[in-house]
Amino acid sequence: MTVETIDIIREENLVYRKTPALTDNVMHYCPGCSHGVVHKLVAEVIEETGIREQTIGVSPVGCSVLAYNYLDIDWAEAAHGRAPAVATGISRLHPEKYVFTYQGDGDLASIGTAEVMHACNRGENIVIIFVNNAIYGMTGGQMAPTTLVGQVTSTTPYGRDVKLNGFPMKITELLAQLDGTGFVTRQAVHTPLAIRKAKNAIRKAFENTKKDKGTSFIEIVGTCSSGWKMTPVDANRWMVENMFPKYPLGDIKDI
Amino acid sequence: MAEIKLMKGNEVIAEAAIRCGCDGYFGYPITPQSEVMETLMAREPWKETGMVVLQAESEIAAINMVYGAAACGKRAMTSSSSPGISLKQEGLTYLAGAELPCLVVDVVRGGPGLGTIQPAQSDYFQATRGGGHGDYHLLVLAPASVQEMNDFVSLGFDLAFKYRNPVMILADGVIGQMMEKVQLADYSPRWTDDDIERISGKWALTGKKGRDRHVATSLELDSYKQEIFNHKLQAKYRLMQENDARHEELHCEDAEYIFVAYGSSARICQKSIQLCREQGIKAGLFRPVTLYPFPRVPLRALSRRVKGFMAVEMSAGQMVEDVRLTVDANVPVEHFGRYGGVIPTPDEIVEALKKQIISAS
Ligand SMILES: Cc1ncc(C[n+]2csc(CCOP(=O)(O)OP(=O)(O)O)c2C)c(N)n1
Ligand code: SF4
Ligand SMILES: [Mg+2]
């Protein structure tokens, strides 16, 4: 750093800083991964709404298993897919707390389908953050229920074939059908505008907890550059061109 | 004033949970233990003590709800029967790995598979060996009466928090379904936030306030640290063996032959002892009350002065392995079991003792 730059870094010149709800730990996510951005948004909302001391997170099995190393709040680490049941136990015994799960598409839409369906159907007073990157990132890029038709993964090396593997699952639309959900939305974090919208949705979801509006569900369509075997820039482009038509952004339900 | 009632074992589990200040019960119906949740729902303890009762969508969900509640330092429990306990094994290994205390009741029925709804003791392995993956154990209590169904609920919670480990009450369909006189415990209040802070303030999820964050997890990717954590678990299991292995002896003082049996089988063996003694056979009963830790020390001591042991179980031979591992090698250990939902009679147990041990030696 040149002397001049150091000179500029003064308190009065700072326009942006890391929210204190994020720890100083170096994140393990690959370059271009959506998880890091989503973590930051959740942390900022928790900090800005002043609920850090009353918030308990439930992390999944997936690349975000170590979310508890990055958000400086109390956490429970759940078994694969079971986060909504764990969150139910916490929320029922701590009705005054803000409880949220953070889950990937394999965790939530495959092995944990029953748990998320029934937590949403009971209208558990929790927030569910669902990062859909159309792949199993953590285990090396296998097909997820959300993998697109024709998408190449390590277990669909010739592309997802509906005869063999069925269709991409729009679980968010399914959950919106349930009377227990109050707010269901699909967002993304690939542009500053999208990030701003996603953050507003996350803020609204946490505020809903206070109003006892049932389960708030936020899908974030994200990228997995490593699993997709693309550069971060190409991954964003591929997501806009291929994921958004199948998983259109916007509010699905808001009561 | 102690309240004495005539109640079913399963109903008593529910009543004892409310009275001991349990915070939450999460369950899924299965015969022969559905009365536990039915009793709780009829009692509506949330109006009385604030205890939460929730019917989950599956046993898997129920045990994970327990995990969430337990992580908050609350006294949480679930109950089920054998097929449901198989489903809970995933949750149990996570609870053991995250060192979370909770109470699980297994009212055993015959198997394998869907099996039968009749009583059995064939879940001994999945209860005592750590039925899920990894090197872990539950602390397992085996009630032999409706009274013990009552007593072991609060004892179970005490031991769970003493060791930060899941505790299982391993009953069977007989104990769950039969009615007996029971002296109910007096009410103790549920823990307050201050109590939780005092008892579990070092780890419970209560909201990060003025301290480092708490994380309930069983994940440790560094193998060397994972091994050290496993050492800690093993040390805990050794402490359980030293301090909390429990058993009961009946007529063992002069006994030449000893039945080793727990739960309903121990009750039946009491009658067999009487029949033996009428025929001049000096028989006694060794009843493990904790199945894990297995009461090794007193059983080994007995083995130095008796002529043989007969393990009696409603299984094809599971607890008998622990008996064999415990006693001196030169003392015969035989097994007699009826299983698949069949209950042994006192007479056939006496006949088995005579045939397999007395006339064989
Ligand atoms: C019971 C069980 N089955 C399988 C696994 C292996 N596993 C770990 S993460 C994962 C998939 C995660 O994918 P996703 O939820 O989409 O999260 P991502 O890594 O993509 O964020 C699987 C199958 C496991 N840990 N536990
Ligand atoms: S593998 Fe994919 S989901 Fe996992 S950190 Fe890398 S980019 Fe993110
Ligand atoms: Mg994924």
Image (tube, helix red, strand yellow):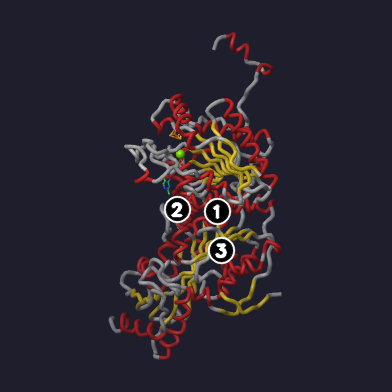
* CA separation in Å, label 3 and label 2: 20 Å
Q: Which mark is residue B217?
A: none
Q: Residues within 10 Å of mark 3 (few under 14, many from 20)?
A: many
Quadrant of res A16: top right
Q: Amino acid at mark 2?
A: Gln
Residue at 42% across, 56% down? B132
**Residue A22, horizontal then vertical, whole percent:** 59, 32
According to the picture, the residue beneath numbered tag 1 turns out to be A118
Q: Amino acid at mark 3?
A: Gly
* CA separation in Å, label 1 and label 3: 30 Å
According to the picture, the residue beneath numbered tag 2 turns out to be B234
- The reply to whether the residue tagged 1 has its Cβ within 8 angstroms of ligand 1 is no
Quadrant of res A227: top left
The C terminus of chain A sits in image quarter: top right
Q: Are marks 2 and 1 on the same chain?
A: no
Q: Which mark is residue B156?
A: 3
Quadrant field for ligand 1: top left
